[in-house]
Amino acid sequence: MMKERFAKLLLGEDMSGGGKGVCTALAISNAITNLSATVFGELWRLEPLAPQKKEMWKREMEWLLCVSDSIVELVPSIQEFPGGGTYEVMVTRPRLDLYMNLPALKKLDAILITMLDGFSETEFWYVDRGIVVGDGGDCGAYSSSVSGGRPSIRQEEKWWLPCPKVPPNGLSEDARKKLQQCRDSTNQVLKAAMAINNSVLAEMEIPTAYLETLPKNGKDCLGDIIYRYITADQFSPECLLDCLDLSTEHQTLEIANRIEAAVHVWKQKDQRKHTNHTKGKRSSWGGKVKGLVSDSEKNIFLSQRAETLLHSLRAQFPGLPQTALDMNKIQYNKDVGQSILESYSRVMESLAFNIMARIDDVLYVDDAIKQRAAAETVSLFSRSGFSGRPIQRRLSPSPFSIQHTPYASPFATPTFCSPTPLTGSPRRAASSLKRNDIKEDPDRKFEKPFASEFEKVWSYTGSLSARRVSENAPERD
């Protein structure tokens, strides 16, 4: 097995041997992603991993990560002579980003595996959906909702998942408290993995292939509606987002891609203006933005506005999948160390997200059973007590998936911005794209056994400083 993995990495996944394989960085990234899909791809229940899969994950990740042991940098070191005195020599040490973040990712990995092992003995269990429909048991609150209401959100989106079942009176206080602690801990793991992943992506160079696909100017990237608001005298990112159709993840991601493309178009144009500054050739503003006196200032001004809008969009929808630029960075990245950190943090992010989803399924069923029992206690005949149905947290799709919804363009029915948000704005609920309340209080603490672990883990995640390496792009006003 090790020989097979080694051969695939050397051949760049081109088994014909014709030299048409991918680069080493992408081959390792794909290997980590495929291994994660094999081991965790069917995480449908809260239960320990099978011993074979756990051993496979530990063994093959150790093989793939051993490459990082040879990625070093030279640093000065003071050595002492045997007879006294000192001298300076250059010694090797692990590269700084790997030294800071790889141990943190290994710690997050161990926490999630240990958490799954803790679900060996639970008060809840699982039944296939066909059996649930047949017996009509207490899990009917999950499969058909309480008293004939709408189906569970998780059932609508993940119909193949087994249905969790709880005792007739619901989970005990201790069992529910343990589940909530696990959820809080997993949420912290998710935040840490996302922080590392975002930092690594920010460090990656912008590939030339991406810049070559960009339109000639920012207006072609954004479209008339968004471009009109960005170039207006008064600019409010929140007001502009209220005027856009962000009702689906696909439309929101499309807008994020357009804004990000415009940012880099304007930055490239600004760099070209600086290059041609000595020639003294400058074009007029064309009346688009007032108060500025040069094309260079105009490009900087517009790129800053677009970056502000993109930041507001990401803050509103933190669970948004990777943009086109992020995927291009992963595909064309040549740095093996960055590839290891990005892929490892991405699969940890996906695993944490899926564990949170399974915990939310169980908590939702428990809420439904307890509220139905409480309503029946109040009155056996009155149906008014059923209105207090539990609210299930809305979960976004897996970080690996992108929902393609081509039925409508986000620019099909533009609504002009006003000083106050429009009541009929098509923006979706604040929680629709969040990964299980990721925007919870960052200072929130949780109880043992995981609190002490995160004091060590979070010290690793702030190591990477964002830097953007921009290159030339085609130019046109």
Image (cartoon, rainbow, N blue to C red):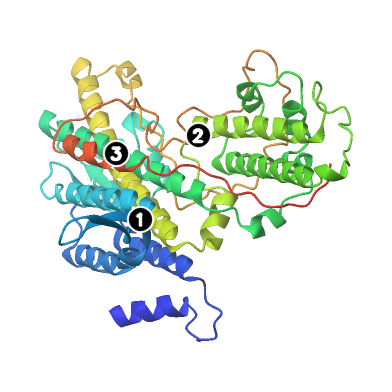
Drawn side of residue 432 relative to residue 266, left or right = left
- Res 393 quadrant in image: top left
Q: Residue at x 56, y 38 (%)?
A: 248
Drawn side of residue 294 relative to residue 112, left or right = right
Q: Position of residue 383 (x, y in %)?
A: 32, 19
Q: Secondary structure at mark 2?
A: loop
Q: Nearer the viewer, residue 189 or 366?
A: 189
Cα–Cα span, label 2 and label 1: 41 Å
Q: Residue at x 35, y 39 (%)?
A: 191
2 vs 1, front mark: 1
For badge 3, the amino acid type reads Trp
8 vs 243: above or below: below
Discs 2, 1 touching: Cβ within 8 Å = no
Q: In the image, which disc is placed on residue 182?
A: none
Quadrant housing the N terminus: bottom left
The mark nearer the N terminus, 1 or 3, is 1
For badge 2, the amino acid type reads Phe
Q: Secondary structure at mark 1?
A: strand
Q: Nearer the viewer, residue 337 or 327?
A: 337
Q: Label 3 neighbourhood size at 10 Å, few (<14), some (14-19), many (20+)? A: some
Residue bearing the label numbered 2: 317
Q: Secondary structure at mark 3?
A: helix
Q: Nearer the viewer, residue 394 or 356?
A: 356
Whether residue 32 appears in this view of the structure is yes
Q: Position of residue 288 (x, y in %)?
A: 83, 28
Cα–Cα span, label 3 and label 2: 23 Å
Drawn side of residue 206 relative to residue 455, left or right = right
